Amino acid sequence: MSTATSQTRATPIQVAGRAAAPVGGLWDRLAHPAPPAARFDPSTLTGLPEAAGRWLAHAIAPGTPMYRAVLLEMEGHIRLGRWLPFRAVQVHAPPDGYVWAARTRLGPLSITGYDRYADGVGQMRWRLLGRVPVVNATGPDLDHSAAGRVALDACFVPTALLTLPVTWRAGSNADTAIAEWTVGDHTLRPELHVGADGALRSVAMARWAKPSGHPWGEYPCGGSLHDEADFGGIKLPTRMRVGYFFGTNEWAEGEFFRARITSATFL
């Protein structure tokens, strides 16, 4: 485990250029939650499933403010037909929403844009060379799918899971716990797998989605989490592999995201 910087400086415009301009106002709103009203007290973990308590006691230092959001910087590879390098920034404020803005390259051509969710509405908007539309997706199916991402990515704001109305249940074995909660109109149940040392190893759930070659429906979605760094009192996994059909024999087909978190600032 290492201690990492906790100051994120990049903005969507700096990373994705003018393609991210439409989402600047939402980024600012999600990045300014109400100040934390309390600090973490380990005694509040009493009554949680053992795996959940083990993770939260490991991840949050006593006295850490009960943050509601996080700013992340990350880099890695995303599969768009083939694996392409990317750089991205994300604000995640469960259950209110997120913005993920990124830049990747297809040979000499840049692809920039964002995924977003707020006020019950999801959107994916991507441009080639900052101008030519590649993706501009909206609609009820995407709203449902984006709400699922809010739930899955909430593991990067562990303090928020202790302030939101989450119903914790034991998972399929002693090392798993299910966090059931509502995002918009959708009740979601991500299952967290926790190591013996308290580090988070994976997160997965049934997510409404349309994986390549498949119709809209619920599919296993999640990923494995690796390594760990301390960002100002909160330990996060810093490497991840994410996709559909996680935990099945179709994982090689469904994996689409490999990333490393390089910075985190809690809000």
Image: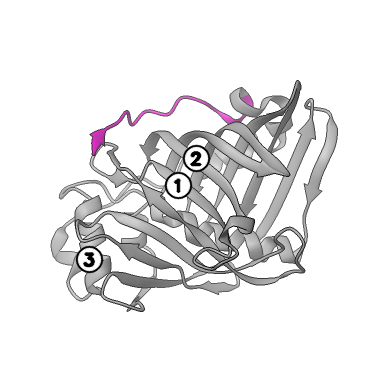
Residue at (54% x, 42% y) in the render? 29
- The residue that disc 2 covers is 259
Name the chief secondary structure element in magenta.
loop
Q: Which circle marks residue 53 in the picture?
A: 3
Which residue sits furthest top? 108
Question: Which secondary structure, mark 1?
Answer: strand
> Label 3: how many residues lie within 10 Å, few (<14), some (14-19) or many (20+)?
some
Quarter the N terminus occupies: top left
Question: Which secondary structure, mark 3?
Answer: helix
Residue 141 in the magenta stretch? The answer is: no
Q: Which circle marks residue 240 in the picture?
A: 1
> Which color scheme is applied?
one colour
Residue 147 or residue 54, whichever sits in front: 54
Evaluate whether residue 27 shows in this view: yes
Q: Amino acid at mark 2?
A: Ala
Question: Which secondary structure, mark 2?
Answer: strand
